[in-house]
Amino acid sequence: MTFIKERQMYNPSSPYAQEFIDHEEILDSLQEAEKESRNPERVAQILEKAALLKGLTHREAAILMDCNDPALEEKIYALAASIKQRFYGNRIVLFAPLYLSNYCVNGCVYCPYHYKNKSIPRRKLSQEEIAAEVRALIRTGHKRLAVEAGEDPVNNPLEYILESIKTIYSVSEGGNSIRRVNVNIAATDVESYRKLKAAGIGTYILFQETYNREQYLKLHPTGPKSNYEWHTEAMDRAQEGGCDDVGIGVLFGLSGYRYELVGLLMHAEHLEARFGVGPHTISVPRICPAEDISVEDFKDALPDNIFRKLVAVLRVAVPYTGMIISTRESARMREQLLHCGISQISGGSRTSVGGYTTVERHDETAQFDIADTRPLDSVVRWLLENDHIPSFCTACYREGRTGDRFMSLCKSGKIGLCCTPNALMTLKEYLMDYASPETRAAGEALIEKSLADIPLERTREITVRHLKEIEEGARDFRF
C-alpha cells in the first residue's frame, strides 16, 4: 500500500522550511495578486494600510508588485520614499566587503567560485594579508566591513573565520579602526553561530539565492549548499545561537521575481513570528556578469524598471528593515534606488581576494563585476550633493541595541533620536581624517544644516559639543 503524505499547510511559526516557505501558498498569493492588482480600490486600500507604517503581508505586497496603473505606481514610489525618510531619515550607511578566500566546494552555477571553474585563480589571505587589507580600508575611511568567504571546510574552516575577525578588530591605523564586522559565510550549526556571536560579529548575512525549491536544486547541483532545508533554516539556527541581527536576501534573476518577492517576505514574516525580530537587513542583488558567468544564461534577469519597483514594494512592505544595494549596480541605478528606500550601500568596493592592497584593480579573483567603481570619497561627495548624510555609525551594535531592542526602537520611530547625531559625528570624523577638500566643504555644510533636524535640544547641544571635540582630535562619540 502506498501512503501519500498530506501537504503541510503554510505556517510562519514553523521551524521547517517547507512550512514557512510554502510553495502552494506562494502560488496562491501570485494568483490572487494577478486578479486583485487590477482592482484600483483594493490597491488603494493596501497603500492606505502601508501608510500606517506597520508593513504589509506577502499577499498584499504581491498585489502592489502586479499593479500596472501608472498613477498608483507613482503612489508606491512616493510612499516608499516617505517611509524610508520616516524610519531612516536621509542617512545612508556605508560599508565595504572584504573577501578572505575564494576557495569553495559548492557547484553553484551562477557563481564563478564554483569548484569546477579552473580558470579563476584560487587565493586565501593570511592573517598578515588580512591586516594589510584592513589598514588599506581604514585609510579610505571605512568603519564597517562585511566579511565574505567561499564554503570550504578545509581551506576556510570556522576557526579561520574567527581568527580573521579577531585580526580585523585588532588593527589600528592612524588612531582609527574597524568598529563593526558583519559576516556573510555559509550556513552552519548553532554552536558555530554561538562562536561567531562571541567573536563580536554585527549582522550575520546569508542570501537565500532563490526560494523556489525546484530552481534552487538545479542551481546548486553539488556541495553542502545543495541542501535546501539546511540553507533556508540557517537564520533560525543563527537566532538560536545568539546572532539576533540577521540579514537575508535573494539574487534576483535566478528565478521569477514575483515568486522571490513573496518568498523573501514570507521569510521575514517567519523570523518575526518565531523570534519576534524581523530581518535586520534585506539585500537586493541581481544577477550580473562575472568570470565564467553570463547574464544571457538567466532568462529571469531583471530589467531596471522592474528592479526599481521591486525595491519600492519591499520598502513599503518591511518599513523597519535596512535595505542594502551593492556596487553591482551602476551609479545611475543606485541613485534611483536611494529614492525607493535603500538605506545602506557599499562604496569603494573590491570583490576580489586581496583587492584593496594592489595599486591596479585586481579582478581575476573577483566574485562579480563592479559597476560603480568610484572611490569612497567620490561616493561620499555624491551622497552629500544629493542631500544624504553618509553615515559610518556602528553605535547600536556597540551599545547592545541589537535584535528586539533595535527593532522596538525602529518600529516606534525613536531610533532616529540617536541615529542622526551618530551619523553626523561619524561623518565629521571622516571629513577630518580622510575627505578631499571638496568633500569636506560639502560635508561641513550638510552637518550645519542637519543639526536643526535633531528634535531634542539637549541631544543637539551634546552633538554640537562633540563635533567641536572631533575637530580638536577626539574620536568615537556615540549616543
Image (cartoon, rainbow, N blue to C red):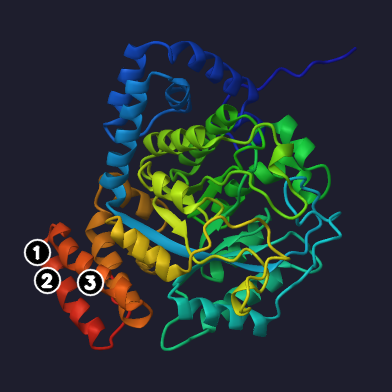
Quickly name the residue at label 3.
444
The dot on residue 351 is none
Label 1 element class: helix
Q: Position of residue 184 (x, y in %)?
A: 60, 58
Please report whichever mark, 2 or 3, sits nearer to the chain's N-terminal start: 3
Quickly name the residue at label 2.
461
Indicate whether 413 appears above or below 212.
Answer: below
Report, in whole angstroms, how far the alpha carbon at label 1 lies from the one at label 3: 20 Å
Report, in whole angstroms, how far the alpha carbon at label 1 lies from the one at label 2: 6 Å
Q: Position of residue 295 (x, y in %)?
A: 69, 42
Quickly name the residue at label 1.
457
Quadrant where the image shows the C terminus: bottom left
The residue positioned 37% from the left and 35% from the top of the image is: 316
Q: Which residue sits furthest left?
A: 457
Q: Amino acid at mark 1?
A: Glu
Instruction: Kindly check if marks 1 and 2 are in contact, taking CB atoms under 8 A apart as contact.
Output: yes
| Closer to us: 328 or 130 | 328
Quadrant assignment, res 15: top right
Callout 1 crowding tier (Cα within 10 Å): few <14, some 14–19, many ≥20: few
